[in-house]
Amino acid sequence: MAKKDEGKSTSKSRGQPTKYKPEYVTQVEKLCLLGATDKDIADFFEVAESTINNWKIEYPEFLESIKKGKLLADANVANSLYKRALGYEAPDIDIRVIDNQIVETPLIKHYPPDPTSAIFWLKNRQPDKWRDKQIQEVSGTVTNQNINLSNDEFRVIAKELLEKV
């Protein structure tokens, strides 16, 4: 005798239809390039953060776009931090008014090394060598006056303490 389907749906789709659209792949990469977190992405697409996590599983191209966007954004920040740590030169324009005429002069502006950026870079890249070490020394002795109490003496003290509470 054949088994009856016990009320289970043969359809794979359950719950609400997904809000996911293929164009989200390019949109999410751009959002990540702007520094968006998963929460920001969820807010943008007007879904819960758990939905974003589900989309990462169900749509591999969506996950890859997030990874790519975040990686590029992090690389841009790391590059800027690196430049600041070492110092750099960048083109600039000097604008002045001379004899009632606006004169624009192109120039190269020098930005000196930034020690704070260098310290931050080193602490994060080589934490074993550069992190702030906190050495704490303890002096004195530790004594426990109750170490030689018998079980009965300990119970009496515990009972007295409980009565106070």
Image: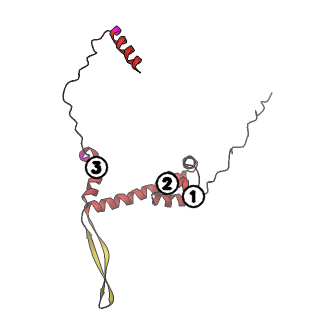
Residue at x 50%, y 56% (from the top left corner): 65
Q: Which residue is mark 1?
A: 24
Amino acid type shown at disc 3 = Lys
Give the prevailing secondary structure in the magenta stretch.
loop
Q: Earlier in the sequence, mark 1 or mark 3?
A: 1
Q: Is residue 115 magenta?
A: no
Residue at x 24%, y 47% (from the top left corner): 130
Q: Which residue is mark 3?
A: 123
* Quarter placement of the C terminus: top left
Q: Name the element at disc 3.
A: helix
* Alpha carbon distance from label 1 to label 3: 37 Å
Residue occupying the far front of the picture: 164
Q: Which mark is residue 133?
A: none
Residue occupying the far left of the picture: 140
Q: Nearer the viewer, residue 60 or 105?
A: 105
Residue 1 in the image, given as x and y percentages of width and height: 81, 27
Rendered image quadrant of residue 83: bottom left
* Alpha carbon distance from label 2 to label 1: 10 Å
Q: How is the image coloured?
A: secondary structure
Residue 64 in the image, given as x and y percentages of width and height: 50, 53
Q: Which mark is residue 66?
A: 2
Amino acid type shown at disc 2 = Ile
Region of the chain picked out in magenta, as a range: 129-152
Residue 74 falls left or right of residue 65? left
Q: Name the element at disc 1.
A: helix
Rendered image quadrant of residue 146: top left
Q: Earlier in the sequence, mark 2 or mark 1?
A: 1
Pointers 1 and 3 in contact (CB under 8 A)? no
Q: Nearer the viewer, mark 2 or mark 3?
A: 3
Q: Nearer the viewer, mark 1 or mark 3?
A: 3
Residue 33 in the image, given as x and y percentages of width and height: 46, 60
